[in-house]
Image (cartoon, grey):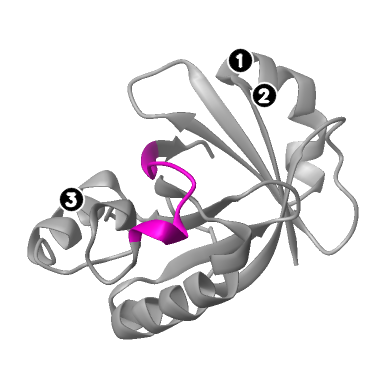
Amino acid sequence: MNIYLASGTFDFLVKKYAKQIDQQSLIAMQVYGDENAVLLHETSGPSIFAAPRKYETVFDKGDFSDKKYAVMNHIPVTDEHKPLFEQNIKRSLEQIDSQISTYRFIRPLKGDTYIILSVWAERKDFIIWKQKNSTLDSPITGDPTNGGIFQHAMFNGKAYLLELTISS
């Protein structure tokens, strides 16, 4: 499965792709507390976006229905370490698989930044999960570039999280 991402302001993206949102598997996500947004198109075919960021799904679980909140962990990885990184993330996701109903681990088709997208019913569910697992070295919330189970030479830069609300 392919995932395509387009970024911009929420109003611009929703107006531009309003007709396709009903007909395509598009998810509009607004950056929490901000006017910026990400439109996600998950499909086995080509993107409807003119110039999207292109990803392929490495691992996935669940669907986006009835979900209102998402967390995207962006992690830049050097080319030579991508296979090891994917193996480490697979192991980490297997350990927490029963705790999270929906996620996507996506590999960039161009560039170096992987994304781990976790999707939650509500923001409070994510906060509760994060508090319960505060000692867990999790790829969902953690910064692997700060040590932990991963090695520093593996990364091209610092990881960052985006918290988003999902529009229905």
- Considering the numbered disc 3 on the image, is that residue within a helix, a strand or a loop? helix
Q: Position of residue 26 (x, y in %)?
A: 69, 45
Q: Residue at x 37, y 40 (%)?
A: 160
Task: Kindly report which numbered mark, 3 or 2, lies closer to the viewer in this rendering.
Answer: 3
Residue lying at the far front of the rendered structure: 153
Q: Position of residue 148 (x, y in %)?
A: 22, 66
* Residue pointed to by mark 2: 14
Task: Kindly report which numbered mark, 1 or 3, lies closer to the viewer in this rendering.
Answer: 3
- Considering the numbered disc 2 on the image, is that residue within a helix, a strand or a loop? helix
Amino acid type indicated by mark 3: Ile
Q: Earlier in the sequence, mark 3 or mark 2?
A: 2
Q: Which residues are magenta?
A: 152-163
Q: Could you tell whether 106 is left or right of 22 in the image?
A: left
Asked whether disc 1 touches disc 2, contact meaning CB atoms under 8 Å apart, the reply is yes
Quadrant where the N terminus is found in the figure: bottom right
* Residue pointed to by mark 1: 11
* Residue pointed to by mark 3: 127
